[in-house]
Amino acid sequence: MGATTLWKSILCAVVSTVAIGPLLYWIVAKWFKERDFWQRYFSFSKIALGVVTLLYCGSHFYNSYLGAKQFHYKYGNLAPHLSLLVKNPIGQKSFQLAYRLFPNLSGELSLHIAEESAKIFWLKRLITQEESSLCGFLNRYQCFEKTLESIQQHSPLGQTGSILATATGALIIFKEKEKLTKKTQKEEVLKDSVFRLVRMTLLAQRSLHKEGRLKNLLPGFPAAEIADLGPKRIEEAKRHQYSLQYFLEQQFPSPVREALLLENAENLILVKYFKTSHEKLSHALTKLKEMKYCDEFCQKRILHYQEKLDQNYSSLVRQKGLTYVTMSYEEHFPLIGGFFDRSFKDKKP
């Protein structure tokens, strides 16, 4: 354990002792009335100190033992110092049950976004360390790509995680290119960087067609109820721009209304994300193709990646629901806010 981690562990233990000691005293004081107050306080403070230190240090070593596998878990990314308790099958099932306690989908979605953001944050932090135990002999980009591939196989990322992964991967590629340019020819480094960026983006987007959709990520999402409503009514709801709040409120039960709005917002974000990344990467490949140093093998790779990008984008747009995205961001997102705080209940068209 490094010096920084040791000091954090000591600080955490001291703070937790002050906070947990009185609580433990309050719980068990009834059974030890014959003992002095301070004796009880310090006795249980010692227990708290030992438990917190053991949990903190144990989680640190447990994460080191897991390596890239620590990112395979859907829950517990917000509290890496509790990994020993959370990142196991029992802990994951407990968290999934806890998610169902939220009264609306906005609570589930907020926690889901926070979990995915924390996962990418800790992954980036581990990979960008000077000496990362996660990477071994791989360079930073190879390490990121390999770990991202592993994550997509075990706990596919949603739109938040995929967008953050794309941005993080692009940053790592840019920094690696800066270092390599000083040692090798610029042309080769540029080609390699463009191909890496395309491959990494396709990897980050892969699960967004099926596994990474909200209906598969949020435990409380009423996917079955929406399917039972029939496509015609759902299409009507998505096409109905004027006073959508009132229309949905009259036509659908509350959880389904909220789910329809969240699904439509997800569609808006995904179409925008895929369209923007498709345009930028296609432009980069076209520029690369026009350069003199792009040989026959380079041309073949460009054609292959261009086909993959086109297939990826076309496949997403053809999915059910995405062809009916007609509302603008300005029209749609204030409505979601209305559903979140329930402030629109008495509004009429």
Image: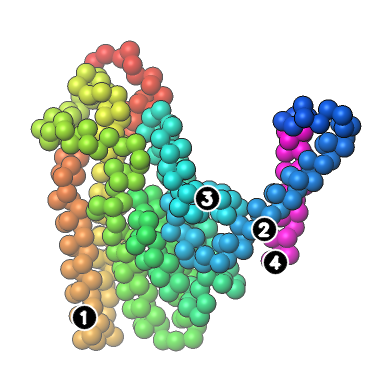
The mark nearer the N terminus, 1 or 4, is 4
The amino acid type, in three-letter code, at marker 4 is Gly
Q: How much space separates mark 3 and mark 4, taking CA atoms?
A: 23 Å
Q: How much space separates mark 1 and mark 3, taking CA atoms?
A: 48 Å
Camera-nearest label, 1 or 4: 4
| Left or right, residue 250 beside residue 86 | left
The amino acid type, in three-letter code, at marker 2 is Cys
In this rendered view, identify the residue nearer to me: 77 or 175: 77
Residue 202: give x, y in percent of width and height: 29, 64
* Residue appearing at x 41%, y 28% in the figure: 103
Instruction: Name the residue that disc number 4 marks.
Output: 2
Camera-nearest label, 3 or 4: 3
The amino acid type, in three-letter code, at marker 3 is Val
In this rendered view, identify the residue nearer to me: 101 or 175: 101
- Structural crowding at the residue carrying mark 1, measured as other residues with C-alpha within 10 Å and reported as few (<14), some (14–19) or many (≥20): some
Residue 307: give x, y in percent of width and height: 17, 68
Q: Quadrant of the C terminus?
A: top left
**Is there a contact, CB below 8 Å, between mark 2 and mark 1?**
no
Q: Secondary structure at mark 4?
A: loop
Camera-nearest label, 1 or 3: 3
* Residue appearing at x 46%, y 81% in the figure: 181
The mark nearer the N terminus, 2 or 1, is 2
Q: How much space separates mark 2 and mark 4, taking CA atoms?
A: 11 Å
What is the number of the mark on residue 299?
A: 1
* Residue appearing at x 76%, y 38% in the figure: 21
Q: Secondary structure at mark 3?
A: helix
Per the rendered image, the range of residues in magenta is: 1-25
The mark nearer the N terminus, 1 or 3, is 3
